[in-house]
Each structure stands twice: as structure tokens, then as C-alpha cells.
Image (cartoon, rainbow, N blue to C red):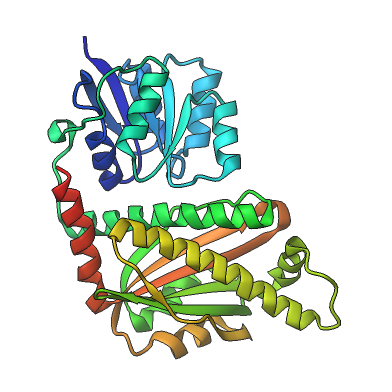
Amino acid sequence: MSTPILICDDSGFARRQMARSIPDGWDVDISFAEDGNQALTLIREGKGDVVFLDLNMPVMDGYQTMEVIREEDLPCLVIVVSGDVQAQARERMLALGALDFIRKPIDNEKLTHILSSYGIYSGKADSTAAHTQDSATSDEDKLDACREMVNIAMGRAGESLAELLGEFIDLPIPNVNLIESNELSMAVAEINRNDSVSAVSKGFVSEGISGEALVIFNDTNSQNIVELLKYPPSESPASLALEALMDVSNILIGACLNGLSEQLNVEFSHTHPVLLGQHKGLSTLLSDNVHRWGKLMAIEIGYAIKARDISFDLLLLFPGDAINQLYSRLLNDDKDSL
């Protein structure tokens, strides 16, 4: 008898990847959900004896979904599959009753080991395309693939920052937009509404893929960040604030780019971080920096440390000539694994 499997993830690209990771010898009947609310409906219908659950989703995220599963004592085994690999995220989900936690992108051997350890499946680590949804390459599919790529890289950066600061980092769903460079300030202003910000920029390039990463700080956060980093006292608070911005930016950008490198199978060369400006309007900082690019892909990630009232944005910008290279590497790899 087939085992009802439910894959819950807001990304179609991620759902296909997860389905391909199901061991070939496992007799399963797979259903898919795009958010926790859909997942709960399917579990109640008996379509999710084993659930592979993402954390960061719209409508109802993985934490909320797990809370309902526990409250209603729904009959399912939950394995968290997420780009958010912070220790606190893992601990929180295990405390809610999740069976185990595996990071994206999926390691097939590790997945098979987890399934075998809990007696869910015993067999080889082979996987097959027979379980997958159709792979598609519409414009929306391309953006979805990029969004999932950044979601994984974002999780790596969040983990590094959490280890440095000893605090849980709230991770969002990345915003991915194809826009003209003169629309960038307006697009980001919809998310970051602060009148005065500081920004650090770092360029990167490799094999036809170039771009720029910016970390944008609300100026009211500077002192909180300094206190969190536990810097020794200084006669120059302004110097400490600048050092804090540069340190956080280096860690955040470096970890995120490493996450992108792993998925794109490239090695990025980085420029030295540059302070774009302090205590300026966001539109001024951005317009001075990317007006030359024309069309670009803008990816905005809003990190937050709610316990410390700290928030900042990581902005990844890819010029038009790099976008097709991104698509090609992501979607060709997606097809090659079919």
C-alpha cells in the first residue's frame, strides 16, 4: 500500500526538487501544498502520513502549521525541510513535535538516512523523476527558481548572523522583482520606509554572473547593533557604529554569496565593502549607485531581530545581462536532475 506523502512549500521549484529526492524504491502517493493552510486540509483528508514542511511561507508558515498539528493531534510525521537552519529554528520545531530537520537543497543520502532511522523507509538512496511535477520555464517559474535560490542563501546568512549575535533572526519570504533601475528606489521604499538610512555595498562577479549586494540599515538601529556586538567602549560612538555596520554587512553578504555559489556552482570574486553613505535618504543612495544598469533583478530580504528591535535589509541586484545566466544555471540544473 502506498504511503501518503505531502510536500508543503510555497515554491513550485522547491516542491519539484523535494519530489525528486524521494527514494526510488519507496511506494508513495505524493500530494502538494503551497502553504500551511492547504497542508492542514490535506492532512485531515489522510493525504499526509509523512509531511515535508517548509518554514517560511505566506498565509500560514511552518511554525503555525506545526502548532495546529500538535493542537489537533493530527496523525502525521513531520520532517522540516528549510533554508532556515538556525539552531533556534530547529529547536523550536522539534519542541513542537517535528520528527527531524533537513536543510535545503536536499541531500538525498541524508534524507534516506533520516527516513531509515525512524523506520519510515528502508532501502537505497536512489531517487527518480517519476515522482516529480512537470518542470516548466515560464517567466513566473524563472522568478520562482530565483526566489528559492535566494531563500536558501538567505538561510545560510541568517545562520551565520545568529551564531555571531547569539539571537534568533526572523527571516522573511524574499521579494524578487524585474524592474528598471529608475524604479528601484520606489520598489524598495514600499518595504523600507525609513527617512534616514546607512548602506554598505559589495560587488561580486563570476562566469557571466555579476551583481551588487547592499545592506541597508535604519539609522535608529545603530546603537542597538553596537550593544549586541559587545564592542569595548570607545570615545567615538560614530566610529563604533560604522564598525558595526561593516562587520554585520561583511558576514551577511559573505554568507549569502556563499549560499548562492553552492547552488549556481560558481565561485564569486568579491570587491571590498564600501560605505555608500550614512544618514541619507534611501532614494539618494540607490539612484547614485545603479542608475547606469537599465533593467535589473532586485531581490530584497528583510532581516529582523525582534527581541532587540533591530531590522535591516539585504538587497541583491543583478543587471540585465546576468539574469539569463542565472536562469540558465538554475533551470538547466533543475532539468538535468530529472
Query: Front-most of 300 and 91?
Result: 91
Determine the image quadrant of residue 126.
Answer: top left
> On the rendered structure, is 308 left or right of 86?
right
Image: 48 above or below 189: above
Q: Left or right: where does residue 61 sit relative to residue 328? A: right
- How many discs mark residues in the rendered view? 0
Q: Is residue 56 above or below residue 68?
A: below
The residue at the point 62 percent across, 62 percent down is: 311
Examine the image and state in which quarter residue 138 appears. Answer: bottom left
Q: Residue furthest top?
A: 1
> Can you see residue 135?
yes
Query: Which residue is pictured at 32% across the width and 85% down the height?
Result: 293
Residue plotted at (42% across, 62% down): 258
Q: Percent x, y for residue 310?
A: 67, 61
Of residues 314 and 118, the one nearer the viewer is: 118
Position of the N terminus by quadrant: top left
Q: Position of residue 150 (x, y in %)?
A: 38, 58
Q: Position of residue 222 (x, y in %)?
A: 71, 72
Query: Dividing the image into 4 quarters, which one contains the C terminus?
Result: top left
Residue 191 seen from this side = no
Residue toward you, 206 or 13: 206
Where is residue 294, by image quadrant?
Answer: bottom left
Question: Residue 88 appears at what percent x and percent y?
Answer: 61, 41
Relative placement, left or right, of 221 versus 91 is right
Q: Residue at x 15, y 46 (%)?
A: 135
Q: 253 or 319, which is in the foreground? A: 253
